[in-house]
Image (cartoon, rainbow, N blue to C red):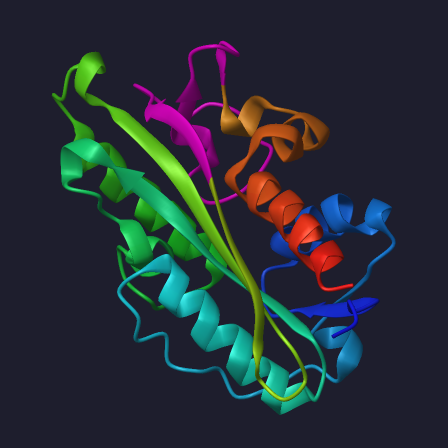
Amino acid sequence: MSAPREIVVATGNPHKVEEIRAILGPSGLVVRSLDEVGGACPEPDETGRTFEANARIKAVAYAKATGRTVLADDSGLEVDALGGEPGVDSAIWAGAHGTRAERDARNNVKLAERMRGIPADRRSARFVCCMCLADSAGRVLAETRGAFEGRIGDAPRGSHGFGYDPWLWLDDAGCSSAQLSPQAKNARSHRGHAARAMVEAIRMLG
């Protein structure tokens, strides 16, 4: 089986496409968005209760729908003091209605409310990203996982990134995920780890 030279990233989130393109592009892979290959495809129901399962559901469905090699990811925030919430429900934790920006804002308000009064030594958290690559027939070619460890800060900080980035505080860097430059974030983020592992997995395909 030969390694793909072009992949489609199965997401409607332009931030994810930009991050993945920045990481995979230097390896020689051509990274396309769904919009670049015809746009709207029926969104599969993400019925999995793990990041891995949902990444697989999306990769297989979009690969079959587009007839192309597709990379899908499922990612989110795990907060230990909340029993791993919001987990696979990260994007819709405070409701699925509204624009992405409105959902993000509601989710961050909910996070602040749920974390109120929890001491610093119990605020450990991480972003998790699971990726799945499927060929045009929907066969799974590779799966990877990455994590980005930190803790929930006492207030949101920074304007880079998206979603919960302003809340994930990085003690070693002395800043939040949203205060990192895009390059610094890609170097250490959950998506960066999973994407670099995917580059290696693709190379192994020949």
Residue 64 covered by magenta stretch = no
Kindly give the residue lying farthest to the left in the view shown.
117
Percent position of residue 26, x then y: 85, 45
Residue found 65% across the figure and 55% down from its top: 201
The residue sitting at 32% across, 49% down in the picture is 106
Percent position of residue 153, x then y: 33, 21
The part of the image, by quadrant, that contains residue 126 is: top left
Residue occupying the point 83% across, 58% down: 29
Q: Residue at x 18, y 30 (%)?
A: 115
Quarter of image, res 71: bottom right
Number of residue marks: 0
Q: Position of residue 82 (x, y in %)?
A: 16, 39
The quadrant of the picture occupied by the N terminus is: bottom right
Quadrant in which the C terminus appears:
bottom right
Left or right: 199 in relation to 193: right
Going by the image, does 43 lie left or right of 62? left
Q: Is residue 63 above or below residue 12?
A: below
The picture places residue 7, in percent across and down from the top left corner, at 74, 69
Q: Is residue 103 above or below residue 139?
A: above
The magenta stretch is: 147-175
Q: Is residue 125 above or below residue 190?
A: above
- Residue 165 magenta: yes
Q: Is residue 93 left or right of residue 8?
A: left
Q: Nearer the viewer, residue 61 or 102?
A: 61
Nearest to the observer: residue 168 or residue 21: 21
